[in-house]
Amino acid sequence: MAVALSVGCAIWGYFALLYGSRRRLDRSVDRKSKDRAMLTCLLVGLLLPGGLAWFVAIFGELNAIDPPLQGGAAAVTSLSALLIPLSMLVSSSVDWYLIRPFREGVHELPACQPEIQKSEKAMVYARYWIMHRMVTEFLVYASIIGLIALAATIVGQNTHSETGKNIFNLIGLVGIVGWSLSELGKLKAALEFVRFPTCGLASWVAGRTEDGLDISGFVLDVSIMPGVQLIEEPRGNPAPDIALKNHSVPLAYRNTIELIPPPHQVCPGRNCEFWIPDCEIGLRRREQQAGAEQPRTELEVPQ
């Protein structure tokens, strides 16, 4: 547990340092509050339990409670139970410190800008987003499989009837195989998208839903399920969830995705596609540059 938590802290720290090392303009109040929330998650979710785990590893076991599992069974159970929240926490750090700053223009122009869309950055970051979520889901599924197998083994060992043991072992095997095939199978489409992406973040695309309906919209998010998530109109603030099948292109249908021209001028006025409220920094930089380039009139010349 100490080693696993240390690895999680190291990954979190890498992306946090990468985020903090880049030159930033003033962050919004909302972003500052969310930055503090992420640091709280690091402290409570990783550093505190990691410190306790290293304390136990160095100074000996805590014998206040006699553990029901010992040896290898305890190690497998602890690691499987730990990897589920650990992988989610680390994945959230990649989201906040790497993907969203790119999409929302924290360090440079927002991803919806034509300059960014002409480069390969938008597609590369879409691959990053799918990649780390694919790894997270794989670790969660593997942990659940380990817990199911351990539970079936313990029940079988504590059953005196040979027939009962065989039944529990069979139930555990069928559950692991059936559940694994149904859940892990969808990671194949994610791996194919990582290898051969067909769209980037903040692009305007057309595609096909799981039900075969043709849709088009602005790529705001990508995930394992429901896939490439599109929006067609302003969501408002606070923004509702967009993980809807009828507005998403599954990763298995990635070949149906094609780029389309934006239906309106990108970033009119102060609104960055008027769907991503946190685009303020990159957009403000562009406005400042535009204001500096405008020639002064006679009335603007200081006396």
Image (tube, rainbow, N blue to C red):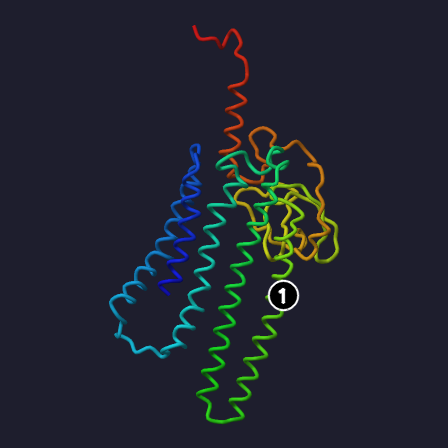
Q: Quadrant of residue 60?
A: bottom left
Q: Quadrant of residue 251?
A: bottom right
Question: In the rendered image of this protein, does residue 75 appear above or below residue 47?
Answer: below
Percent across and percent down for residue 115 are: 61, 33
Q: Residue at x 65, y 56 (%)?
A: 192
Percent across and percent down for residue 290 are: 54, 22
Image quadrant where one finds the N terminus: bottom left
Amino acid of disc 1: Gly
Percent across and percent down for residue 240 are: 56, 49
Query: Does residue 28 appear to the left or right of 119 in the view shown?
Result: left
Residue 191 vs residue 28, the one in the foreground: 191
Q: Estimate how packed mark 1 is, as few (under 14), some (14 to 19) or many (20 or more) residues with alpha carbons within 10 Å.
A: few
Residue 104 vs residue 239, the one in the foreground: 104
Percent across and percent down for residue 245 are: 65, 56
Q: Residue at x 52, y 90 (%)?
A: 164
Question: In the rendered image of this protein, does residue 70 appear above or below residue 245?
Answer: below
Q: Residue at x 52, y 46 (%)?
A: 99
**Which element type, helix, strand or loop, lies under badge 1?**
loop
Outermost residue toward the front in this view: 195
Image quadrant where one finds the C terminus: top left
Question: In the rendered image of this protein, does residue 261 appear above or below residue 215?
Answer: above
Q: Residue at x 53, y 84 (%)?
A: 169
Question: In the rendered image of this protein, does residue 176 appear above or below residue 29?
Answer: below
Residue annotated with mark 1: 185
Image label count? 1
Residue 157 vs residue 264, the one in the foreground: 157
